[in-house]
């Protein structure tokens, strides 16, 4: 079982429009509503791979109930902490080949709600070997919240991964107790170091502070694949050229593949190839955080992984 935590989940609403009429009425009958958030997206792909994900985080109000009910319909367990605030909506308007997004900030988490989450971690993570933390922090929380989860995981012998950005990522990478896996892109690595970096320097950078004590680092390079650190080895992963239909959710899909493979004790090459295959399969579908599992073997065999020396 893999626990995936989305501290600030959402009800994702998408409207498909022929034309978006600014300052006028626009009507549509093509609407989709489903539980969303980066950790929830990771869980969707884990389920498609055959894993048993469990979802947690904070939910409140009718929209929070919608998320729990939606996950139940997908046969996925949830162990959310209930809050007084209302879970947010995130709206995507698909129009004329474009995508316009409106993202609500979400509720403010009270101190007692955050403390309840941390004190409930034994129950929330029961049966899990891996804990994944994905996404931004809601109002009311700082990176210390994520640090407490990481400390709990490490002290209980659980593998812990974090996929976040900005100040939160910087704080966690520089913390005394570090996560086992992070998934930044090249820009986020440069921001962490506050300097420009070249791809050819990345191999050495991942072996230095503040990254050297993080066993798994997946540096996404989009269509060019990824550079991956696994313990003391660095790998370059190349993916085949494909016509992307929808790249949204590919990072979450790639992370799901990595966590699935780590949970199954795959070797380095198969961890990387599973991760890259899931990210690639996601771009080939219109649906976010979805892979067509019947195509898995085809693309898995086209992933090229080379150890860099």
Image (spheres, rainbow, N blue to C red):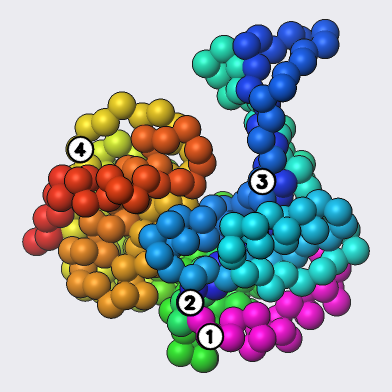
Sequence-wise first label, 2 or 3: 2
Q: Residue furthest bottom?
A: 156
Q: In the rendered image of this protein, does residue 232 appear above or below residue 280? A: below
Q: Which residue is mark 1?
A: 127
Marks 3 and 4, how far apart at CA? 31 Å
Q: Which residue is mark 4?
A: 240
Marks 2 and 3, how far apart at CA? 23 Å
The answer to whether residue 275 is magenta is no
Task: Kindly check if marks 1 and 2 are in contact, taking CB atoms under 8 A apart as contact.
Answer: yes
Marks 4 and 1, how far apart at CA? 37 Å
Q: Which residue is mark 3?
A: 34
In the picture, the disc for residue 1 is: 2
| Mark in front: 4 vs 1 | 1
Sequence-wise first label, 3 or 1: 3
Front residue of 150/5: it is 5
Residue 68 seen in the current view: yes
Sequence-wise first label, 1 or 2: 2
């Amino acid at each position: 079982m893999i626990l995936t935590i989305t501290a600030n989940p959402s009800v994702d609403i998408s409207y498909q429009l022929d034309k978006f009429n600014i300052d006028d009425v626009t009507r549509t009958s093509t609407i989709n509503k489903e539980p969303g958030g980066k950790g929830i997206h990771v869980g969707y792909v884990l389920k498609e791979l055959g894993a048993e994900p469990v979802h947690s985080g904070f939910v409140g109000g009718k929209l929070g109930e919608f998320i729990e009910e939606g996950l139940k319909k997908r046969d996925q367990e949830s162990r959310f902490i209930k809050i007084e605030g209302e879970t947010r909506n995130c709206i995507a308007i698909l129009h004329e080949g474009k995508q316009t997004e409106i993202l609500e900030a979400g509720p403010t988490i009270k101190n007692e709600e955050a403390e309840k989450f941390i004190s409930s971690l034994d129950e929330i993570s029961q049966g899990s070997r891996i804990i994944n933390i994905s996404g931004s922090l809601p109002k009311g929380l700082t990176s210390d919240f994520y640090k407490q989860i990481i400390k709990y995981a490490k002290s209980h012998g659980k593998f812990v991964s974090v996929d976040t950005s900005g100040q939160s990522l910087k704080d966690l990478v520089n913390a005394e107790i570090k996560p086992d896996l992070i998934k930044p892109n090249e820009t986020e690595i440069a921001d962490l170091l506050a300097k420009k970096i070249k791809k050819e320097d990345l191999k050495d950078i991942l072996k230095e502070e503040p990254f050297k004590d993080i066993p798994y680092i997946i540096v996404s390079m989009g269509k060019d694949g990824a550079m991956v650190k696994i313990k003391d080895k660095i790998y370059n992963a190349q993916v085949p050229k494909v016509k992307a239909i929808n790249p949204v959710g590919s990072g979450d899909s790639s992370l799901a593949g990595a966590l699935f493979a780590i949970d199954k004790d795959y070797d380095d090459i198969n961890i990387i190839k599973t991760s890259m295959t899931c990210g690639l399969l996601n771009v080939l579908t219109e649906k976010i955080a979805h892979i067509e599992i019947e195509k898995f073997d085809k693309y898995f065999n086209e992933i090229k992984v080379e150890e860099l020396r």
